[in-house]
Amino acid sequence: MAGTLDIPNLDQARAVIVHPAPDHVAALMRQLNAIGLSVTNAWPDLPASAITADFIFYDTDMGHDAQFPWGPGTAPMPMIALVGTEAPGRIEWAARMGADALLLKPVGSSGAFSALLMARHSFELRRTLTSEIKQLRQRMSARQTVVQAVALLSAQGKSQDAAYDQLRQLAMAWRINVEEAAARIVKNATDKGILRDSH
Amino acid sequence: MKKTVDLGVLYSQSGTYAAISQAVLRGAMAGIDEVNASSSSQISFRPILRDPEGRIYRYAPLCADIIANSDARHVIGCVTSSARKEVIPILDRTNAMLWYNLPFEGFETSNRVIYSHACANQHLLPLLSWCFQNFGTTPYLVGSNYIWGWETCRVARMRTDEAGGRVLGERYLPLGDEDIDTLIAEIETLRPAFILNSLVGASSYAFLHAYGELGRRDPHFTAETCPVVSCNLTEAELPQLGQDAEGLVSVGPHFCPSRSHDGRNSSFEIISRQSVLTLAAILMAQGDQPFENFIADHGARFGIDPATHHSTLSVKVAQVRGGVFEVLHHWPDIAPDPYLTRSSRHPNIGHPKLSVVS
């Protein structure tokens, strides 16, 4: 994610406030309306439609796991914790639910805008990192396949360096990554029975 | 028999931005006189004047002083955003209201403030769109070293990138600093398409005089080929600029169609006067309802958007020609968008110049 925050079109965003007393968060509603979001209130349980919301604000004083249709830390959108009691247990719960930003209660006439931007930034960052880690894990688990493919290619009389280079060129030609190319070569060899002896 | 109502007035009469401050002060006092002289008005205002002398840390104590030592629940005041941010905690504590009558960068909608002048979608965005269309997308940005300068330049940079252009340079001067030689030398080397000037007060005058000088030395640096444009230049500061005001481009809700005397009739002054008249009208209609509830329910009747406490305004791009601002482009009735989140409220000039996107 670039260093700049993407602000426009927050006016098409939808926020759900999960709080038992809507009157206590009227100032938050006012701020969100001024910024341009459409806001609904939910308590105690989030309706199924909340899954398409762009932001969730959730009360940490009275909140609990079962209110959310997703597991702790796996919300599909940025989550902003509304913190009243700063008891460690409650902060812990807020963090476990996956707070991307905090807003302290009572909410006054500012704070919501920074919370929205921070939350979206943290959420996007987390999502990018998670998907990168997943990709790297997949590639790491393919190490053995790459070794096998290089061995197969060098069995045709090439040095290991030249074999690895050929693997990379094949990957480029097939427009897939090295790990996938290796898997294809190994599968091909297995199908032809070349690898039977090594099993 | 009129009811007398205390009204705080918190404008500096001296300091680096005195010319702007005196314009809004003049407007507020004219509004008060008008309300007091009107036979149809059931109230008359008693102004409670305090002068922070352009010193940032005088604003909060003097605002507290107005509220503690009079019956004022409303204060007309503050020129800079820094000053406004200083007084908001006082307003929050005392439930008083501030009427802020100058253009500002936005990103704030306090329940305790009425923002009567323009926010960035009503000044900066339309001005940039006009500049990109007429002069190109390689600006140079210069501003005073506080929130107004920073945020104006940040948005300008973002918009320039979006338009496929490039910011050639960006410089900040401390408020009141008049040391502009480096700035001028840099502009001379970089030859930008236009210069966005968000300097305030003495720094701005020093810069504009030096730029005038540069233009006399090198004709590229004149209004035809490389204009200086600004979101905060009005008639109020033309006397300080003299001949070097010629060709400057500004944006605002009103410009005075005839030559103004002693910097009078700027949009700062007009909007400040209007804010007093609006307050008088609201006070007469408000009854026993708390002010903020009344604005939430009836603000629109008085031209105040209940959601943002801002106003819908005309947007005019104008250039100083023969000592008078001549309007070059006009968008009527632009609704406020203080957080720049509503693209539909961002005025634009028809078809932007084509640019190669790599």
Image: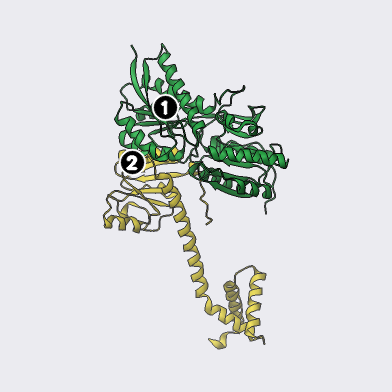
Chain colours: A yellow, B green
Q: Could you tell me residue A79's position as x and y percent?
A: 40, 52
Amino acid at the residue labelled 1:
Gly
Q: Residue A25 carries which label?
A: 2
Amino acid at the residue labelled 2:
Val
Question: Residue lying farthest right?
Answer: B219
Element class at badge 2: helix
Which residue bears the numbered disc 1? B299
Q: Circle 2: is it few (<14), some (14-19), or many (20+) Cα within 10 Å?
A: many
- Please tell me whether residue B133 is drawn above or below residue A90 in the rendered image: above
The residue depicted at 48 percent of the width and 67 percent of the height is A133
Element class at badge 1: helix
Toward which corner of the image does residue B92 lie, by quadrant?
A: top left
Q: Circle 1: is it few (<14), some (14-19), or many (20+) Cα within 10 Å?
A: many
Q: Could you tell me residue B324's position as x and y percent?
A: 63, 26
Q: Note whether residue A86 is visible.
A: yes
The residue depicted at 48 percent of the width and 28 percent of the height is B24
Instruction: Establish whether labels 2 and 1 are both on one chain.
Output: no
Q: Which mark is residue B253?
A: none
